Image (cartoon, coloured by chain):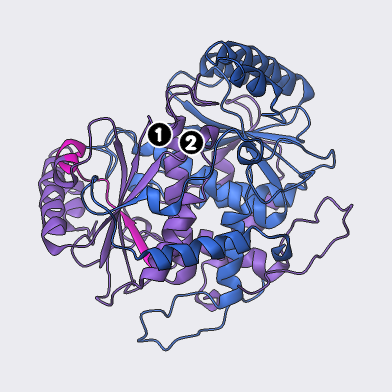
Chain colours: A blue, B purple
Amino acid sequence: MTEVAPPLHAAGDPRRFSFAGAHRDAVYTAIHRRRDVRLFRDEPVDDAILARLLAAGHGAPSVGFMQPWTFMVVRSAETKARVKDLYLRERQAAACFFDEPRRSQYLGLKLEGICEAPVNICVTCDPTRAGNQVLGRNSQPETDVYSTCLAVQNIWLAARAEGLGVGWVSILKLGELRDILAIPPHVVPVAYLCVGWPVDLPPRPMLQDSGWRERLALRSVIRGERFDSQGDLPDEVLSQVEAEVAGWSDDRLI
Amino acid sequence: MTEVAPPLHAAGDPRRFSFAGAHRDAVYTAIHRRRDVRLFRDEPVDDAILARLLAAGHGAPSVGFMQPWTFMVVRSAETKARVKDLYLRERQAAACFFDEPRRSQYLGLKLEGICEAPVNICVTCDPTRAGNQVLGRNSQPETDVYSTCLAVQNIWLAARAEGLGVGWVSILKLGELRDILAIPPHVVPVAYLCVGWPVDLPPRPMLQDSGWRERLALRSVIRGERFDSQGDLPDEVLSQVEAEVAGWSDDRLI
């Protein structure tokens, strides 16, 4: 592997673990240019790249270092077709809860690429992985599933750096998905991911571009130490960062 | 912002969104050199850096693009002291479930840096953020909380690129935490993070170095498309990637 960044700061400098500018920006580019991808090309994904994605997932933080995740690699057309059928039923069921014109808009959206993506990954969580008593899980039992979500985001960002697209399909009934993949009752299917070479990686989320829902202002998701209080970050700083993020969403950056 | 990577591949090449080598490695370095930090220096964190971390969180994927997260910035010594007191009680309570010598080992571990970290961030999820009907949440209601976890990992990796440390404190009773931070009943506190300049960023997790628990082999967390089946990734590929990851955990890389 190449050396990423020479030391920028002296040993005693608090910033001594910071990445050099371009390398820091690479991380932000992965974060801000990542998309939920539903259109895939049919070229295969190399084993070495797939292994790097799974190793990135395995490198996630976990409560009590329990590493509760299992990554199930789905490749067969038959299994993908069964999952796709499950998606189609659930999509239709979910449509019942939307009123027109939202319902037609929902049914017109491309929300998965299960069969087109060369690889699907079902990311599961085994709450028994480290026994009953897990350090840090006593008061928040759900932290094992949370840890598994952190692994999903590692995979997603690693995929972005590799130029791969990832799409998370949540329009699936979990009981039926367990049956298709023979997942034991005590294991939680957390995420079903489609992975492959993307047809495109547009600057904005498809649900934003299609008018489904707007990006919220950064200011609106920041608070102070009481939930009803404003945060103390100055507006000009937040505006500056929002402008930077818009820059990262520019085609010049890839 | 600097340009991250010139195009490596022609427009028709499936790999055309991939980062150049050193930039890809920067993302992997953030992933594999990220640690759960509990020892912080007392230098403050610039507003601009903090804003970039929160913007990274806000850039996470979310089910139906609902963006359910709110980032509460906690800075006052008084509030941090109340959270620390909550931690100390819960730590003692959780210790009751470990037998010796595990109990003494648990009580001897430094598991938080609440008061030392200049900034704490409570990351919460508001399930009502996008109304009752959220695209993609019909069959998996927990995906709003999952989305919030993805935001946590974005913050964690952005912090790593900035040279900052993050520690997730899960040894807290959520009811009491709600009271301290005046979080409304319908909002879920997902993660309580300590953020600041790290005293150190060791190559391996503290719970690994202290002998609490081992890193699992990559092979052991990969399966095929049935949970009881082996994955088809060749052992030599997995070994190669594990060696690469060990390289990323080397001090040469930062």
Q: Quadrant of residue B95?
A: top left
- Please give the chain letter of the residue carrying mark 2: B
Residue placed at 52% from the left, 33% from the top?
B63
Mark 2 residue element: loop
Q: Are marks 1 and 2 on the same chain?
A: yes
Q: Any mark on residue B129, and which?
A: 1
- Please give the chain letter of the residue carrying mark 1: B
> Is residue A90 visible to the viewer in this orientation of the structure?
yes
Estimate how packed mark 2 is, as few (under 14), some (14 to 19) or many (20 or more) residues with alpha carbons within 10 Å: many
Q: Are marks 1 and 2 in contact (CB under 8 Å)?
A: yes
Q: Is residue A152 left or right of residue B212?
A: right
Q: Amino acid at mark 1?
A: Arg
Magenta region includes residue B168: yes
Judge by depth and name the residue closer to the eye, B189 or A17.
Answer: B189
Estimate how packed mark 1 is, as few (under 14), some (14 to 19) or many (20 or more) residues with alpha carbons within 10 Å: some
The magenta stretch spans which residues? B164-178
> Is residue B27 visible to the viewer in this orientation of the structure?
no
- How far apart marks 1 and 2 lie (CA) works out to 7 Å
Q: Amino acid at mark 2?
A: Met
Q: Earlier in the sequence, mark 1 or mark 2?
A: 2
Which residue does the numbered mark 2 point to in the structure image?
B66
Magenta region includes residue B49: no
